[in-house]
Image (cartoon, grey):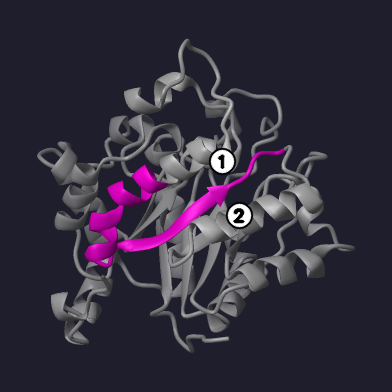
Amino acid sequence: MGGTSGTGGILVGTCSWTDRALVASGWYPSGRRDAEGRLRYYAERFPVVEVDATYYALPSARNSALWAERTPDGFRFDVKAFSLLTGHPTRAEALPAGLRAAGRGRVEPDEGLLDEVWERFAGALAPLRRADRLGTLLFQFPPWFAPGPRAEARLARCAERTRGWPVAVEFRHPDWWREDRRAATTDLLTGLDMSAVAVDMTQTLPTSLPPVTPVTSPRLAVARFHGRSPDWGTGTKEAKFRHTYTEPELTEWVPRLHAMARRADQLHVLFNNCCADAAVHAAESMRRLLGARTGADHAAEIAAEGEGPAHRAG
C-alpha cells in the first residue's frame, strides 16, 4: 500500500461546518457568519470537512460549485451518501418530484429507482470532482446491515454503481468487526477498493463498534469520532453526540492514526461530536497532537507544490 512518512497526508476536520449548534456557539466571528463567510473561515482552519446534508436530501450542482469556489486547492469534502442508497428509511418528500411515487410516506426502492437516484446524486457532485475537492463518498450503513451473503451482494452492487468514485464504508453493525470475522471484512472491502472507516465511540453498549483501524485502500483511510456518550443507543440526537473529548481520550488514538497514515496516501480524521463547538475544539486538539496542518497551511503547501487547475482531476 502507499503511504506517507510524515503528517502532510493527515487531514483533520469535523463532520459539519453548518451545524446549528456550532453556528450558535460563537465559533464563527462576527462578519463571517453568512454561508460564504462560514465556509471560507472553516477552510482557513481545517483542510477537510464532511457534508451530512446530502444524507437527508439530494445535493445540487449549484451548491457543489459554490463549495468548490469558496475553498482552496487541496481542500477536501467527504460527502455522505443519500439515505436511500444506504438502505435507511427515506420519505418520498426527500426525493425530487419526478421520482416520487403516488402517495406519501416511506419509499420502497427498486434497482431502477436506486440507479436513477445515484445518477442524480453523482451529477450534482460533478463540480466537486472537476475542482478536485471530493475526498470520498461515505456510505454509512444502518445498524441492521449485518454481515452475510445479502449484505455482501449489496456492497458489490454499490461498488459497481460507484465505479470510478472514491468510496468509504462505515458499518454500524458490530459483527462486521468482531475478532472472528475482522479479516474477512477487511478482505471484502479491499477487494471492492472501498476505504474502511475506523470508529471511536462509547464501548459500553451491545451495539458498540470496536476501535479497530483497518486500511483497505491505498488511497485513503478514514477515522470518525462520534463521541462517547452513554446515550448512544437510546438518547435524542443531541444527547447521542454530546461529548467533550479529553486529551487522554484523543492521545490514545495518536499511534493508531499514525499507523493508518503510513498505510495510505491520505488519512481523514473527522469529529462528529457536533454539540456546540465541541467538534471543532476536539479537531484542533487532535491536529496539534498529530502535528497535522491547518487549512491555511495545507493550502499553502499545495500551492507551493504547483497543484493548480492544470493538475486537477476531471
**Spot occupied by residue 39 in the image (x, y as percentages of width and height):** 22, 48
The correct choice, above or below, for 60 with respect to 147 in the image is above
- The location of residue 125, given as percent across then percent down, is 31, 52
Disc 1 residue type? Glu
**Left or right of residue 5, residue 44 in this image:** left
Range covered by the magenta-colored residues? 119-143
Question: Which residue is tagged 1?
Answer: 111
x, y percent for residue 311: 21, 80
Residue 312 image-quadrant placement: bottom left
Please report the residue visible at 29 percent of the width from the left and 62 percent of the height from the top.
129
Q: Secondary structure at mark 2?
A: helix
Is residue 146 within the magenta segment? no
Can residue 147 be seen here? The reply is no
* Depicted 185 relative to depicted 92: above or below: below
Residue type at the position of mark 2: Arg
Task: Report whether residue 165 is seen.
Answer: yes
Examine the rendered structure and indicate whether residue 82 appears above or below residue 193.
above
Q: Are marks 2 and 1 in contact (CB under 8 Å)?
A: yes
Q: Earlier in the sequence, mark 2 or mark 1?
A: 1
